Image: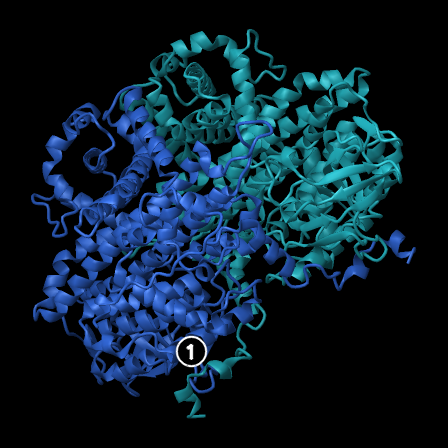
Chain colours: A blue, B cyan
Amino acid sequence: MPEEDKPCPIPDLPRGPLCEYRQRAKFSWKALKQVLEDPNVIRIRYDVWQKLEREPLFAPLTSTLPVDQQKERAAKQVKRIAELKLDPQEIYSMDYKYRVRYLMSINEALHAVCPSMSVKIALGVGLFTNALLAMGSERHSAIYNAAWNREIITCLAITEVSHGSNTKRCRTTATYDPKTQEFIINTPDFEAAKCWVGNLGKTGSMALLFAILHTSDGQNHGLQGFLVPIRDPTTLQPYPGVIVGDIGEKIGLNGIDNGFVMFNNYRIPRENMLNRAGDVTPEGTYESTFTEPGKILGAVLESFSAGRLGIMQESSNTLSHAAVIAVRYAALRKQFGPEKDGPEQSIMEYQLHQWRIFPYLAAACVLKASVFSLTDIYLATVQKSQKDSNGFELLSQIVSELHALVSSSKPLVTWTARDAIQESREACGGHGYLRAANLGELRNNHDPSCTYEGDNNVLGQQASNWLLRQWKAAKVESPVGTANFIERREAILGSNFDAIVRASGGVVESAEFITNCYEWLMCWLLRSTAEQLQHADKDGTDRFKARNDSQVYRARDLSRAYSEYYALECFRKRCLREDVAENLKPVLSNVYLIYGMWCIDRHLATFYAGGFAVGPRFADAIRSALLGACGQLKDSAVAVADAIAPPDWVLNSVIAKSDGRLYENIQNVMMTNPGAMERASWWKDIVPSKMKAKL
Amino acid sequence: MPEEDKPCPIPDLPRGPLCEYRQRAKFSWKALKQVLEDPNVIRIRYDVWQKLEREPLFAPLTSTLPVDQQKERAAKQVKRIAELKLDPQEIYSMDYKYRVRYLMSINEALHAVCPSMSVKIALGVGLFTNALLAMGSERHSAIYNAAWNREIITCLAITEVSHGSNTKRCRTTATYDPKTQEFIINTPDFEAAKCWVGNLGKTGSMALLFAILHTSDGQNHGLQGFLVPIRDPTTLQPYPGVIVGDIGEKIGLNGIDNGFVMFNNYRIPRENMLNRAGDVTPEGTYESTFTEPGKILGAVLESFSAGRLGIMQESSNTLSHAAVIAVRYAALRKQFGPEKDGPEQSIMEYQLHQWRIFPYLAAACVLKASVFSLTDIYLATVQKSQKDSNGFELLSQIVSELHALVSSSKPLVTWTARDAIQESREACGGHGYLRAANLGELRNNHDPSCTYEGDNNVLGQQASNWLLRQWKAAKVESPVGTANFIERREAILGSNFDAIVRASGGVVESAEFITNCYEWLMCWLLRSTAEQLQHADKDGTDRFKARNDSQVYRARDLSRAYSEYYALECFRKRCLREDVAENLKPVLSNVYLIYGMWCIDRHLATFYAGGFAVGPRFADAIRSALLGACGQLKDSAVAVADAIAPPDWVLNSVIAKSDGRLYENIQNVMMTNPGAMERASWWKDIVPSKMKAKL
């Protein structure tokens, strides 16, 4: 039976106090789950989780391990995962899209359980082999195979101590010595040490390293990739000339051994240069394979999109986990009530509480759809490019638009997850501060997602730049279709709140209204950003400064709005598909409205400043629609949370188990935490002296 | 020489790369420090820090200790602090205000170094004795003295597992038994276990416990306070009938042993009831001392204001630390530049980066002023009430206004600190994610401040309720003067952006403009909230629901605006004092503008919705003023950060040392972290099998 036809193995949930709300939902949460998440992805995830649940090495921890033990555990998990063979052999005979989606789904499942381990695998296997494939050639296939088969532990050494976002300014050098046919790798000083490199701190034996290539004629050929042996893979001892170490404790993800490395005129064979774009001859002449080596490097860096998509997939799950915890706790926690001595009510009944947490529940649903779609387009594009003999050309035709989408969506998803975790922590009060609630771990592990693979604020500029290019171009080039609205700019900017409401039949609670608002917002931000840049140009401001001074309230908001617009569109289109049952439509529309109105609410000032509306009606309409939709979601919220929740042991939150036995579960955790009721071993040292005398 | 006349002992800062920016400031950072922080408070803090710096027990840690060791360390620190006698004997002969401010300043200094320890002392010594004083009588003085002299470790047991904010619904009972003249303390089930009690988990021997009093006639006399022995103070073994334990690991503050306790018909002597408000006679009759026992309990709970003020003081320091780290790093970190191969520029030069971090630097300065002023009024009021024979009456006259100020300002300060830490973490990129950057510790330890001593969202409602009462009252009762603007409501609401700009001479960059905007905003929010409540009343909505449905976009924003208005006023008044040197005025005004415009920017939508302005001019004016002020602050920012920074070892951030040697300091930390360059002890377990075979 082909994978697709197997029934989706979603386990039932235990009965308990959450059923009070669960029963109020007018739909099946399992049916909803299969709309919000792809059935194939669900199947792969549950398959992974079932296998991991049996493994002692993956059992949730009850307290934080010392960092060295965290590294040990993650490294052993990486090894164990290889033994578990989670990737069935048959996927390697399937097409690229199917295979990579399968591997991505495995990664999602692993990340939800052990983020450090999943990042270690993603870096050391996925990104390393991707980059090697893009930059290397036949002569590197032994290393490629060894990395893929986990025979060596590998890492990507790009970032330096003093250069992160501005990779091009890295200062590690590779100087060719024709006498020995070797490259001499050198680190001028600690500022140029490769740093933050995952897998490098304690375990990696081979690095894919970026260094400035110098040939013996003194020419600088810019950044190139090299395979650099770091440690003997059989003993894990560093080679002479390599100063390598672990950077020490971090806020989270301490299972990853992030490292630094300095090279002291360290020699590697000529063949270790990755030569797809260009090569150094034995005599020492640099010969480029393509006429524009910068472009191929761009394509190589582009291959890091896979990394950003991975982060978005993981972060959308993190967002879901945070929202599920907040919603289940809000249903179970009762505090205050309408009558002085009457029953108390669930905190989910309070409008303020709904407004705090429901937008994150809605965001989790909507962003799942956009991350899935974006991944789909990405995979289809790469697959097409591989099949087509003219693949590279074809890929570059839509790579810009995909890059803009990824560059704006990665910030949106990671920031939304960040905010969801924090709001959830506060919405769960003191109990949310328990380690066993899992919000602290989520927060500390998620945090770097806003920084790595492109700092959110810097990365987002790639999207606004692309949009501005479309705005200024004679013809909009948007093969994915996300910028086609620019062609209608005049009509859009000629519109306003009143006209749009009229066009929507007087109803603001509609996809049409929300879409129209967004198109106006983007056009206005595009026009005002472009105008500001034009003025600066006239005034003689240099372009670098002009660009930087057009970010706040302009390009930055534009990038955000664009990613929200895309997410809402993806979700809307998903809901329109035939497989969506009628009884799911009200809740899906409810979720769409909450996320849409909530996002528009944050842009209200810009709408007003741009003259889109005057007076209270616009703000009132958006805010009433949002609060109304939140009130409507209340009776469905627990079922929606069930639809995006992983199994209890993966969610791993004592305050949000699906059985709803909140206080019994807390009691169990508190009473059984190691040494909970024992006297402290150090008790004698702290008894006040006067009391000691009485002993 | 009296304390006040001693020169302020602010140490010089080392020379280094930060001097490039430091030298651009047109003022002395030490002079600025003495405006932003009270010279006496500065002196006390440095005195404490000097003493602690010599103590091995207070040396900064380089990695996170296991939680049991964190508890051990904090408990030993508490003991060591008592030995260090940081509180000079002479302060106990000074007046209340001087003495308590002195003790609060010690707490601020301690908290900046070891938050767990400072909370343990604050709970076990400060809040416990405060509450005992307010609720108990002569017969409890032995316990009072023992707690004050650290002869016993104490705790406050109020919150239960299922009741936090709604304390009144606590279910632990104290039933009087006239036969033995004892109270029988009982916990009906785990949901009623006292929980989250600091110092209870491992160390406390005596609890001040809130329980529902039942007399033998079956009458329920509501919540009362009792002294309940938990453990033998000489052995720290729990007494029979007491099930006490530690709640386990938390997100942060793991030095505090938060505990839970259940009582199984546990007997305590009649005298252990705290009887200031009422008492049970030996025969078992409840006699209240005051006619309105509810009121005295209110006053007792009011005494917890001291706790909230403490949190605000600590949080304003946390906010400062986060801002200092972000500013120093932004000055030192260079990335990109105007010319392709030219020098890179400090990230502080980017407008977007200024806009991200300068508002927090400004907020740190402004909120320091409001927290100091608020504490001052509080202390003066309590002192006056103690001297006056009619003290209780007098106190209650302004206690409502103070309560409103504290209830809105505690959320403002704690949330601003929370956001500052997060923005700073992201603004410092990957290096901000190092444990040694200290932002993770700041975040995890600060987090519960948004919840404890009143969840921010719930607490803030106390302020809006008070303001609404003033709005509806025939006469505004605002002895502190913060609500006097309500008397001018008609004129204020009759005004708008254009009129206010005209009144300010066409200049928006002024205190007058900002104040006028705030008064309009508060009046509009008051009117619309009051109207909404009125409508609900007419529609027959019950008041509980009506109140809850008037929070979002209404009462909640009102509470926030009120606290911002108060903070800006306090800062403005501080800047007008005679001791402020002329050359400090530009930077102070700059700071004021940034914070004011930044806050107004967040309320823009409400201003527009309320009809305060139409079209782009208002938004443009606010946003240009903010960006302009940020640009102006750039050359002063490092000096402002110096003015609010603690000594390096207290700030404890490798990326923000005052010597500015960013990369040397990082190198030092990375190369010396324990085992940094050693092979992992578990290396054999993770070498891939195929590689092992080669051994």
Q: Depth check: give the residue in front, B358 or A536.
A: B358
In the displayed structure, A263 sits above or below A8; it is: below
From the top left corner, tell me how far across and down residue B432 is, in percent: 47, 54
Image point 52% across, 23% down: which residue? B464
Which amino acid type corresponds to the residue marked 1 in the rendered image? Lys
From the top left corner, tell me how far across and down residue B647 is, in percent: 63, 48
Secondary structure of the residue carrying numbered label 1: helix
Residue beneath disc 1: A79
From the top left corner, tell me how far across and down residue A148 is, in percent: 31, 78
Q: Is residue B277 visible?
A: yes
- Numbered disc 1: what chain? A
Residue B129 in the figure: left or right of residue B246: right
Q: Depth check: give the residue in front, B227 or A234.
A: B227
Image point 61% across, 51% down: which residue? B648
Q: Depth check: give the residue in front, B224 or B380.
A: B224
Which residue sits furthest bottom? B694
Which residue sits furthest front? B217
**Quadrant of residue B27 within the rendered picture:** top right
Q: Is residue B442 visible?
A: no
**Quadrant of residue B158 within the rendered picture:** top right
Q: Depth check: give the residue in front, B609 or B64.
A: B609
Dividing the image into 4 quarters, which one contains the N terminus of chain B? top right
Q: Residues within 10 Å of mark 1 (few under 14, many from 20)?
A: many
Image point 10% across, 45% down: which residue? A476
